[in-house]
Image (tube, rainbow, N blue to C red):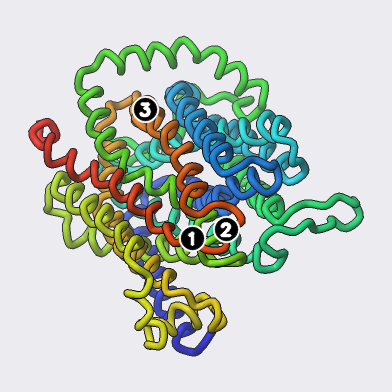
Amino acid sequence: MNYGIILLVAILFIGFLFILWNYAKGLKDSPREIWVLFAAKLIEYAAYGASNMAFVLYLSKDCGLDDVSAGSYIGVWSTLMTCISILVGSVVDAIGIKKTLLIGMSAMLFGRLTMPFTNQLYIATLFAFIPVAIGNALLIPVLSVGIKKFTTPKSTALGFGLFYTLMNVGFAFGGYIFDKVREIFGEHTLNPIPLIGLEISTYQIIFLVSFILTIPSLILILSMRDGIAMNTDGKITLSAKRQTDSNSISSMYREVKNSSKDTFSIMKTVFLERSFWIYLFMLGILVFVKLVFYHFNYTFPKYGIRVLGEGAKVGAIYGILNPVIIIFLVPLIAHLTKTIKSYFMLIAGTLVSSASIFIAALPSYWFESLIPTWFGNLILVDWLELSPDRQNPIILGLVFFIVLFTVGEAIWSPRLMQFSAEIAPSGKEGTYIALSYLPYFLAKMIAGPMSGWLVATYTPEGATSYPDHYMIWIWIGGMTALSPLGLVVFRKLFDR
């Protein structure tokens, strides 16, 4: 790394501290639980980001599934996670934030401990993938609920802004872990564990790192007080339901069991609300652009390794570049566009994001002239540290695509996240946020096999060249374009 890169990193770090300071000033009256929540989720997103990119590689290389089978498996697993989110979302409304977090983190800890030590699919399914799906499903809605409960109406936007910033810091660390472990241990090798005598693969080591990262997250959650919230006046309140044995596993089990009737009662009420279905349809329109993140996690790793070669830093190209840009771009865009209506932000952002995907489908020779320039040197040599024989122009096309996609994401994604939480009626936050994942239920069932089919068709395992690799992005780009198109067609419904 040269001095220019070091200087750039130093400037970015100072800028990041400045962003954090501004958020912290606006949230200084929030209870300490919000900071515990942020810290735990920062660590968790690093673990999630690293392991998520390794899932399809583990299924193919360790468990022996072909591309389509691995993609379909992930599709079913991801759909299961969405289904559990929908069913258990009201649990956070019924038993509270801390207990929900503890149950979710415990499930994640168990699943991540199992995965490094087996390549038997049925064992991994029962004792790793399913517990991880349950853990993720519980943690997804509870975070948004926690931010809303730990802030006032005036500081909610700051809470979601800081969450989005720290989430992307976590994802950036996850991308770094994914690349670093593969760099140290090889793309796919078996590595002996000292004293135990077992051998685990590179991808299983990534899961082991994720397990280790889950431990401090669980410890942080244990330090939270139960029943804490902020009222509209900014005063911290403590729920009268708090009990001395609230941290015990048996107590949590009893409360989950006893709250089942409350949970389904809340869900039944929400399903009868016409406004909820309009809200759900609006989210369904945006499913297509959000599925790009699915392909980044499950299609891009195989695509990158096959097209760019083993050891390719696919974690850096997407997993670091995207979140780092988001960290600095979201506060700037939020400040400059705070008076602009959400509809225009959503349509502009999704239009930019969907159009950017087609850059990756452009002929690679369009970018060859950039390789000897300062820009090509910055990306290929200083950042990705590639030798001359591995400086593929396709990488530059992917960088342009991801940068422009991220600009669009910074426009539409925070607005959508904030809207999803703020529209929820009091006492039904967890239900609304969990049920907002309903449109992804069917979409992920399609996206999983599609992911496997795309890599198997256009970048098949063992081929010496991939002349049609660009077709992957044509398909994904065409799917994503349905989001801005839908926003235009159904504008009147959105306004209402």
Question: Which of the two marks, 3 or 2, is nearer to us in this view?
Answer: 2
Residue 202 at x, y percent in the picture: 70, 56
Q: In the drawing, what numbered circle is on residue 438?
A: 3
Query: On the rendered structure, is 169 left or right of 105?
Result: left
First in sequence: mark 3 vs mark 1 = 3
Q: 402 or 479: nearer the eye?
A: 479
Residue contact between numbered discs 3 and 2, judged by CB atoms under 8 Å: no
- Amino acid marked by disc 2: Ala
Answer above or below: position of 466 versus 47.
below
Q: Evaluate whether residue 293 shows in this view.
A: yes
C-alpha distance separating marks 1 and 2 = 7 Å
- Disc 1 target residue: 466
Pointer 3: residues within 10 angstroms few (<14), some, or many (20+)? some
- Disc 2 target residue: 463
Q: In the drawing, what numbered circle is on residue 236?
A: none
Answer above or below: position of 229 versus 198.
above
C-alpha distance separating marks 3 and 2 = 38 Å
- Amino acid marked by disc 3: Leu
Residue 198 at x, y percent in the picture: 86, 50
Residue 209 at x, y percent in the picture: 67, 54
C-alpha distance separating marks 3 and 1 = 36 Å
Q: Which residue sits at x=30%, y=54%?
A: 409
